[in-house]
């Protein structure tokens, strides 16, 4: 089946730098809104499967939307909760206005910055007798690096870690607690290479570390940083990705029947993740990273990576972390399982089993999951 991409035309109103930025914006918008042509897709191990039920957060843009388009194009039922119903409905509208698809898109509201909203969403799944074959914890946000004051979730967590870690921790806890998973469900967590201060991205700016968890230990939800330090928006994002990797490993350890893997999609600037950054900087940086220095990845690459981890029969790893060298999207779908494969995690993760366990215990306590 061949899917028709939407036609998007954006014209630059001025010459010089603005023309370059407008061109980048057009490419970015097209990559976000276009449904992949899956007739040519070669992601190994995902075609010909029986219909599955999948939940994915962060599906309204970026790699999440790309992955959803792949899932429904393959005939799966995909739950796409967003922080409001308008955003969730827009996913369904954009997909099915472009083409007739064999799968189904189920909308819903799940605001990861509000524990009550997460509870209500889990209740709605339970009342509908949903059983999930795969869960993709993909949503994320990155605060503007100029932010001086920490934003807070409804229950008082620093927003970045509150959404990227605690919100997903709560959701996953409820899915297990309410028996909303099939016996051998897969869980895929979108992390990032910046969790590792020795990685190319992790070396830039502030470095990720949870320290001795003294912030969480002594201040709980009121802490600005998990390690007890002063608020640092760059570090907050990197720490949240470190939490994601710890969470995936501990979730696997406690649930051997599940298949839990995390991954880094690489540097993808043109996604909703960077919505709080300076727009001009983001667009120019996207052009430089992706087209000039060849260290950035495309949205389509990231969506394919997510689909590969979540569905491929070729995935045999339990508790693994997947990644690739910068610029690997140039290899296309054939790279999944070769250039994109099991990767190394940070030294803090490999040597931090006790910290990993303690982070889980504190997270359970703070979000009241038993």
Image (tube, helix red, strand yellow):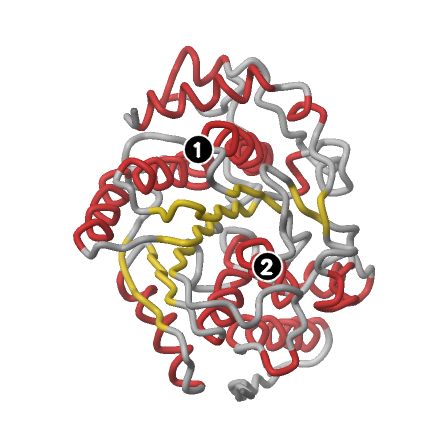
Tell me where residue 41 appears, x and y as whole percent: 64, 75
Disc nearer the start of the sequence (2/1):
1
Tell me where residue 112 appears, x and y as whole percent: 35, 45
Q: CA distance from mark 2 to mark 1?
A: 39 Å
Tell me where residue 163 appears, x and y as whole percent: 41, 41
Picture quadrant where residue 285 is located: bottom right
Q: Secondary structure at mark 1?
A: loop
Tell me the crowding category of disc 2: few under 14, some 14 to 19, or many 20 or more residues within 10 angstroms, Cα based. some
Q: Nearer the viewer, mark 2 or mark 1?
A: 2
Residue on which disc 2 sits:
312
Given residues 141 and 82, the one toward you in this image is 82
Does 141 appear above or below 218?
below
Picture quadrant where residue 25 is located: bottom right
Residue on which disc 1 sits:
150
Given residues 242 and 101, the one toward you in this image is 101
- Residue at x 60% of width, y 77% of height: 26
- Residue at x 34% of width, y 64% of height: 87
Report if the CB atoms under discs 2 and 1 are less than 8 Å apart.
Answer: no
Q: Is residue 219 left or right of residue 227?
A: left
- Residue at x 60% of width, y 71% of height: 28
- The C terminus lies in quadrant: top left
């Amino acid at each position: 089946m061949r899917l028709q991409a939407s036609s998007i035309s954006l014209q630059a109103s001025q010459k010089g730098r603005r023309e370059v930025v407008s061109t980048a914006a057009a490419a970015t918008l097209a990559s976000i809104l276009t449904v992949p042509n899956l007739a040519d897709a070669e992601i190994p191990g995902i075609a010909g499967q029986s219909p599955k039920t999948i939940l994915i957060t962060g599906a309204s843009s970026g790699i999440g939307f790309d992955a959803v388009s792949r899932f429904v194009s393959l005939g799966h039922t995909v739950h796409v909760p967003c922080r409001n119903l308008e955003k969730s409905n827009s996913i369904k509208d954009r997909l099915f206005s472009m083409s007739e698809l064999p799968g189904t898109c189920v909308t819903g509201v799940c605001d990861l910055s509000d524990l009550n909203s997460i509870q209500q969403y889990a209740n709605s799944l339970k009342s509908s007798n949903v059983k999930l074959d795969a869960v993709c914890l993909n949503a994320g946000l990155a605060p503007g690096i100029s932010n001086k004051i920490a934003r807070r979730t409804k229950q008082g967590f620093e927003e970045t870690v509150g959404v990227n870690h605690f919100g997903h921790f709560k959701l996953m806890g409820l899915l297990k607690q309410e028996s909303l998973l099939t016996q051998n469900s897969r869980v895929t967590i979108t992390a990032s290479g910046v969790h590792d201060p020795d990685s190319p991205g992790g070396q830039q700016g502030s470095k990720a570390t949870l320290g001795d968890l003294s912030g969480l230990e002594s201040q709980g939800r009121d802490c600005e940083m998990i390690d007890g330090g002063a608020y640092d928006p760059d570090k907050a994002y990197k720490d949240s990705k470190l939490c994601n990797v710890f969470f995936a490993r501990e979730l696997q350890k406690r649930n051997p029947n599940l298949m839990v893997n995390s991954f880094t999609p690489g540097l993808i600037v043109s996604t909703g993740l960077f919505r709080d950054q300076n727009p001009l900087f983001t667009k120019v940086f996207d052009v430089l990273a992706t087209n000039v220095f060849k260290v950035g990845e495309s949205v389509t690459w990231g969506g394919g990576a997510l689909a590969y981890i979540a569905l491929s029969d070729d995935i045999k790893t339990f508790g693994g972390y997947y990644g690739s060298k910068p610029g690997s999207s140039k290899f296309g779908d054939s790279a999944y399982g070769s250039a994109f494969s099991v990767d190394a995690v940070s030294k803090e993760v490999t040597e931090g089993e006790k910290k990993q366990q303690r982070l889980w215990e504190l997270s359970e306590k703070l979000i009241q999951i038993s």
